[in-house]
Image (cartoon, rainbow, N blue to C red):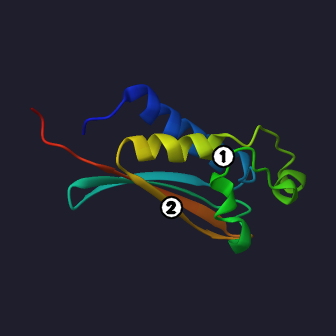
Amino acid sequence: MRADYDKLTQIMHNIVDNAFNYTYADGTVTIGAERDNGSVIISIADTGIGIAKEKQERIWQRFFRDDEQDLVKGTSGTGLGLAIVREYVTMHNGEIWLESTPGAGSTFYVRIPVFAAE
């Protein structure tokens, strides 16, 4: 896979950090990867508080903060992490999406194309 190491590291750091921040101490965070039709799909799943359906598109916006989630977990941040992630994934001609259920957790998926070595 050809990718910018620093940007790929930031993508993983931001998503994994969020997964731990929004998962209770007795919960789990699971990271996986698989090849799929010329791409690598990375998944980061947590058993955390989840994201309401009506907020799932907004999480990619710069400075979006979910005050309800912050109250539940006592977290804080700038609201830039997932906006940066989406920008970096797009720079790699990839895509990102999530599946989430409030009270049950979230799974973020990152698909990055794989290119043959030159």
Q: In this image, 26 relative to 60: left or right?
A: right
Check the picture and name the quadrant holding the C terminus: top left
Q: Position of residue 8 (x, y in %)?
A: 43, 35
Q: In this image, 107 relative to 90: left or right?
A: right
Q: In this image, 54 relative to 85: left or right?
A: right
Which residue does the image show at 75% across and 53% down from the upper left? 24
Q: In this image, 109 relative to 16: left or right?
A: left
Q: Residues within 10 Å of mark 1 (few under 14, many from 20)?
A: some
Q: Position of residue 34 (x, y in %)?
A: 31, 56
Which residue does the image show at 78% across and 38% down from the upper left? 77
Considering the numbered disc 1 on the image, is that residue within a helix, a strand or a loop?
A: helix
Comparing 79 with 105, the one in front is 79
Which residue does the image show at 42% across and 55% down from the upper left? 95
Q: Residue furthest top?
A: 6
Which residue does the image show at 87% across and 56% down from the upper left? 72
Considering the numbered disc 2 on the image, is that residue within a helix, a strand or a loop?
A: strand
- Residue beneath disc 1: 18
